[in-house]
Image (cartoon, helix red, strand yellow):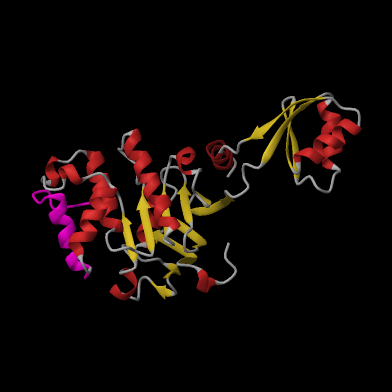
Amino acid sequence: MLDEQSEANLLLENVGKSYGRKPVLERVSFQIAPGEVYALAGPNGSGKTTLIRLVTGLAFPNSGRVLMLGENIHEGGFAVRKHLGAVVEAPAAFYPYLSGRANLERLAWLSGLHSPAERIRDVLFMLELVAVADQPVSAYSLGQRQRLGLAAAILSKPKVLVLDEPTSGLDPDGIQKVHEILKEQAASGVSVLLSTHHLREVSAYTDRVGILGGGRLIDEVVMEGASERTRLRVSEPERALAVLQTLPFVESAELKGEVIVAQGPVSRMIKTLIEDGHEVYEVSADYFDLYEYYRERIKHA
């Protein structure tokens, strides 16, 4: 988390939402820095889409507030929302009888974009839509409409990009293209918030993952360093585990079956185990499986 709220492009403070007597979200708080990718994960009905709608100003919270660049998204009007690019409940809605290019031209006019023709050409190229740019959107496939939605979201070069299931309905090439663009957006300083069920796909470039359950933010996973663990297959694994757990430079160690999974300096762990009389048969990286972690976390929420 950020130390200073002013550093966050997007900040949620104890946001709550209910419909009638039914609470949908309760006291959800997190913040996203410039250049950070934050993924929202959770089962159906956990409140992901409602949260996306609150962040984009399409719904109002019953409690708490949403700040974008330090201003309340629900009170700042266009002055705040001009920094936002979003696709909510994809695929995005377009005029079906107009071409993709014409739809983007209208969005550019509404946002007061300078040099719109050049920027439209750029986003159509980025999303690989040049070949269908002048065809009516009604003739687009689901995947093409999804990519046109992302093109519209990044058209005005927003500082905050909010996407609800951006890869839904895309083929593998389309999914890869969307991931590449989101990484490029983050690298340019954009704060990216996305909801997804495809945790293994986004784990390669997501900075943090917020897990929603029952309308609450039940966990937040910091991806940096999450995979820096080592699998050790050794003689007498239980005794070796006890040794590793006493070492101050070992951050964590646990036994999974007959294999020790530990986090710490690999060479020092191996040296200590050998000096203690153990044979080290195998050493390999233990890659953090975000999806499996999510499943366990939801199961025990």
Residue stretch in magenta: 91-112
Q: What residue lies at 40% left-to-right and 53% top-to-bottom?
A: 184
**Total numbered badges shown on the rendered structure:** 0
Residue 183 higher or lower than 255, as above or below: below
Q: What residue lies at 78% left-to-right and 38% top-to-bottom?
A: 267
| The N terminus: image quadrant | bottom right
Tell me the quarter of the picture where residue 261 sits.
Answer: top right
Task: Decide which of 71, 201 is in the foreground and name it.
Answer: 201
Queried whether the magenta region covers residue 97, the answer comes back as yes
Residue farthest left in this picture = 97
Q: What residue lies at 57% left-to-right and 48% top-to-bottom?
A: 223
Q: Residue 214's x, y, as percent?
A: 49, 49
Queried whether the magenta region covers residue 28, the answer comes back as no
Q: What residue lies at 47% left-to-right and 60% top-to-bottom?
A: 35
Task: Please give left or right for residue 41 compared with residue 238 in the image.
Answer: left
Residue 232 higher or lower than 180, as above or below: above
Task: Decide which of 110, 61 is in the foreground and name it.
Answer: 110
Task: Decide which of 7, 88 is in the foreground and name it.
Answer: 7
Q: Residue 13's x, y, as percent?
A: 50, 67
